[in-house]
Image: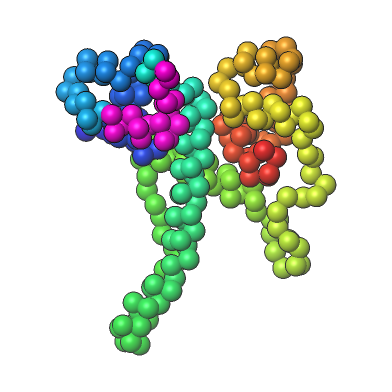
Amino acid sequence: MDENEMSVFGIPEAEEEIYRHFLRNPGTRAEDLHLLPGSRPREERARITRLQELGLLRAEDAERRIFPADPEVALTRLVDVRLHALHQELRGVTRSRHVIDGLRAEQGARTPAPDTSRGALLAHRSGLISHITSLFERIWDQADELSRAGDGTQGGEDASAPHPSGIERRVLVAMCTVGKDEAGARKLGVSVRTYRRHVADLMQTLGAASRVQAALLARERGWI
């Protein structure tokens, strides 16, 4: 059986169904979940609490109503957290050579060590592939030219690289905090057309294929 769509973010099927329920029925109460098939009030309350901690649901108001977070904003945050975890995990794997050496020492010098640096990972899940691709792009953006590898030049952002203006920084923040262009334009006090032009310019400057990737790259550069 296929896993639920949000499982790649660590969201089990039952919690995803609750989030989708409040997307369809914003402003309803937790008690309304009893309408879902197989609902168990105590378990549903714990799931709602976790979704609130993850930023997918907002806390209940005075009338005990619950509202969902905008999917683009919420998933951007989850993507960032997931990519960071994957990055840390891959770094740990690539630094595990000492484990191999320790295990090889148990065998003594009886057999020569193979060429262990070669290998391949075969992945079919689209979610995993997209995250590995995004992670590769993040690492690639931080890489230096090969010709600079031995000249002692420090890696990182080029000091001569363009930096965002004040309005561009505000647009980047709006991209991460509001869901619709109309809301972002209203927040900045500009027209929707002007707001979208700033978004397009920023995506081109960052070399991003999507707004989510643009937000991640901007955070990597310390722009927001």
User: Which residue is at a point 46% across and 49% down the rendered structure image?
Assistant: 85
Residue 20 drawn in magenta: no
- Above-or-below relation of 134 to 88: above
Q: Position of residue 112 (x, y in %)?
A: 37, 81
Q: Position of residue 75 (x, y in %)?
A: 47, 31
Task: Classify the position of the C terminus by image quarter.
Answer: top right
Q: Is residue 124 visible?
A: yes
Q: Position of residue 198 (x, y in %)?
A: 73, 23
Q: Position of residue 166 (x, y in %)?
A: 78, 31
User: Which residue is at a point 67% across and 18% down the rendered structure image?
Assistant: 187
Q: Is residue 115 visible?
A: no
- Above-or-below relation of 206 to 71: below
Image-based side of 207 in relation to 87, left or right:
right
Which residue occupies the foreground of this view, 152 or 72?
A: 72
Report which quarter residue 15 is drawn in: top left
Extreme-right residue of the structure: 160
Image-based side of 106 in relation to 213, left or right:
left
Extreme-front residue of the structure: 62
Task: Classify the position of the N terminus by image quarter.
Answer: top left
Image-based side of 55 in relation to 209, left or right:
left
Report which quarter residue 203 is drawn in: top right
User: Which residue is at a point 70% across and 54% down the rendered structure image?
Assistant: 156
Report which quarter residue 47 is drawn in: top left
Which residue occupies the foreground of this view, 103 or 48?
A: 48
The magenta region covers 45-62
